[in-house]
Amino acid sequence: MGFVGGFVRQNDLVHQEVQLAARLRKDYPSRVDVSVFANHQGQRAHDQILRLLSADHARTLSAEEKLSARVILYGHS
């Protein structure tokens, strides 16, 4: 999950955070889910993480899902 400034679009390749997301999607197309969110979209990012990690996409994680979760957050400032 990448975070950018509030006015940066998630497809604006001028910004390094968006470039990193694009590179990760290209290099690991079947192994990672990469999303970019504005800095004020924390709840939306949290919901996305829960949905991706939950086997039934119900946003409720089992103990096993929590133990096996791997999440990387990155951003700027």
Image (cartoon, rainbow, N blue to C red):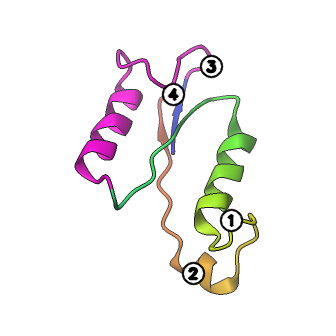
Of the two numbered discs 3 and 1 in the rendering, the one whose residue sits closer to the viewer: 1
Q: Are marks 3 and 4 in contact (CB under 8 Å)?
A: no
Give the residue at mark 2.
67
For label 1, the crowd category at 10 Å Cα-Cα, with few meaning under 14, some 14 to 19 and many 20 or more, is few
Amino acid type, mark 2: Leu
Q: Earlier in the sequence, mark 3 or mark 4?
A: 3
Nearer to me, 47 or 76: 47
The range drawn in magenta is 5-29
Q: Amino acid at mark 3?
A: Gly
Cα distance, mark 3 to mark 4? 12 Å
Q: Residues within 10 Å of mark 4 (few under 14, many from 20)?
A: few
Q: Tally the numbered discs.
A: 4
Label 3 – label 1 distance at C-alpha: 27 Å
The residue where tag 1 is placed is: 57
Asked if labels 2 and 4 touch by Cβ distance under 8 angstroms, the answer is: no
Viewer-side label of 4, 2: 2
Q: Amino acid at mark 4?
A: Ser
Pointer 3: residues within 10 angstroms few (<14), some, or many (20+)? Answer: few
28 relative to 50 in the view: left or right: left
Tell me the distance, in whole angstroms, between the alpha carbons under discs 4 and 2.
29 Å
What label does residue 77 carry, if any? 4
Q: Earlier in the sequence, mark 1 or mark 4?
A: 1
What kind of element bears circle 2?
helix
- Which residue in the protein does label 3 denote? 6
Q: Earlier in the sequence, mark 4 or mark 2?
A: 2
Residue 32: which quarter of the image?
bottom left
Q: Earlier in the sequence, mark 3 or mark 1?
A: 3
